[in-house]
Image (cartoon, rainbow, N blue to C red):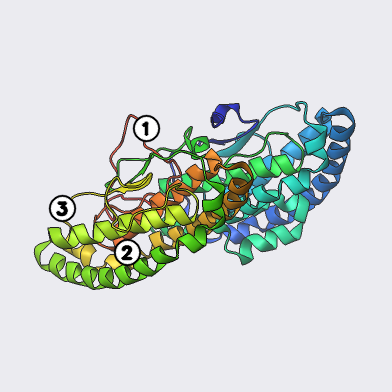
Amino acid sequence: MPTAPEDRPIRIVVRDDALRRNRLTVLLRLFLALPHLVWLALWGIAASFVAIGLWLAVLIEGKAPASLHDFVAGYLRYSTHVAAYVFLAANPFPGFRGAPGYPIDLEIDPPARQSRWTGAFRLLLALPAALIAAALGGGLAWTALAGPYALAAVFLTGGGVAGAAGLLAWFSSLARGRAPRGLRDLTAYALGYSAQSGGYALLLTGRYPTTDPSTAEPFAELPAHAVRIAVADDLTRPRLVVLLRLFLAMPHFLWLALWGLAALAAVVAAWLVALVRGRVPSLLHSFLAAYVRYAVHVLAFVTLVGRRFPGFTGRAGSYGIDVVLPEPGPQRRLTVLARLALAIPAIIVANALGTALWVVAFLGWWYALVRGSMPAGLRDLGATCIRYNAQTYAYLLLLTDRYPYAGPVLAARTRRTPLPDFYAGKTL
């Protein structure tokens, strides 16, 4: 069972619910952050030397000294503050001491006993977590290990998921004076995982980081949406099927490409009809919905998020990782007319999450070959990425006029709140 968020030794804390952003500081954000980036690199160099002392202490005594632990913990907290400021997950200019109290903050438990064996090979064991952190955009927390190279990698690669969310939040904040809630929550989740993985690599904790989206539940929620993911699959993965997964998926790739050509013609026809009637005809809606469901089934199978070999029809409820799509309904003609342009921000986020999904597939493939199962956290992160992907293409293919929601929570809570409309308060 996944560990509850409050049981994790390193936890992200979000105190900023107003989401207001000062336009002037948003415009100059990277320039204002330059002193912090320099200080972060310098503090990171010092933290890397202190981490060597932590490593020796764990090898000898099985526990980190409190003074060394606190120094590295302060660095990790500070790197989270800086990243939250750079990616617009928080608005205030952060302090230079990494003191608690920033709107996007960390809670780090005191030193606890750690295994000497895992401590000896900590950097090697942390490599899978580093790959995920890089895809999610958490490179700033790794400055202590990679120095200025980590800072350069964050900007040269676009910052991963957090970078894509921060870019869109920058435009939104300039236009509206506030950051979209879904993008803020997605960035906070990425920073939280980065802090977990950085803390593990720097020997602040012996608990391996988790990608479980439930770690975002204390500050994030998933509002009601017309497109939802349904996970009814177990975590077992037959090793032979895992080994031959791409080969087995080849017929699906061919069929998906052929169906995609027909779907392109269908969406053009649906677009023309929706411009005139304000809704997509039921026949075209059903055809496109089956295509989106089938694409989700194939994507889940290829990335090991799903277990079984999927069917070729995209029938609802026929696969363990499924997508629930709405019935045809009225849509505003203006948003139909500009649908492709309106979908560009969502496509940017979907592509960033797609990179994270393929990292999940790569790591899950090796894990499943050895253990015969998929880690719950990886599976759920993959399902979350697929959910946003399905919402994006359902919006693009005119199956719904609800804009995709980027919040990283896999399933909605019992108390659900309505999702606002695009250009009428709708957020990414």
Task: Tell me if mark 3 has few (under 14), some (14-19) or many (20+) residues whose alpha carbon lies within 10 angstroms of its own.
Answer: some
Q: Position of residue 18 (x, y in %)?
A: 43, 40
* 197 relative to 137, above or below: above
- For the residue pair 40 and 96, the one nearer the viewer reads as 40
Could you say which quadrant of the image residue 278 lies in? bottom left
What type is the residue that disc 3 sits on? Gly
Which mark's residue is nearer the viewer, 2 or 3? 3
- For the residue pair 140 and 363, the one nearer the viewer reads as 363
Q: Position of residue 280 (x, y in %)?
A: 15, 61
- In this view of the protein, can residue 25 be seen by the observer? no
x 17%, y 57%: residue: 331
Q: Give me the C-alpha separation between circle 2 and circle 3.
A: 19 Å
What type is the residue that disc 2 sits on? Leu
Task: Tell me if mark 1 has few (under 14), some (14-19) or many (20+) residues whose alpha carbon lies within 10 angstroms of its own.
Answer: few
Where's the N terminus, which quadrant?
A: top right
Q: Secondary structure at mark 1?
A: loop
Which residue is the site of mark 3?
Answer: 329
- For the residue pair 74 and 137, the one nearer the viewer reads as 137
Checking the image for residue 171, the label placed there is none
Q: Secondary structure at mark 2?
A: helix
Q: Give me the C-alpha separation between circle 3 and circle 1.
A: 25 Å
Q: Secondary structure at mark 3?
A: loop
Which residue is the site of mark 1?
Answer: 413
Nearer the N terminus, badge 3 or badge 1? 3
Q: Position of residue 33 (x, y in %)?
A: 63, 56
x 42%, y 47%: residue: 182
Which residue is the site of mark 2?
Answer: 342
Task: Tell me if mark 2 has few (under 14), some (14-19) or many (20+) residues whose alpha carbon lies within 10 angstroms of its own.
Answer: some
Nearer the N terminus, badge 2 or badge 3? 3
Asked if residue 226 lies left or right of residue 194, the reply is left
Asked if residue 232 lies left or right of residue 167, the reply is left
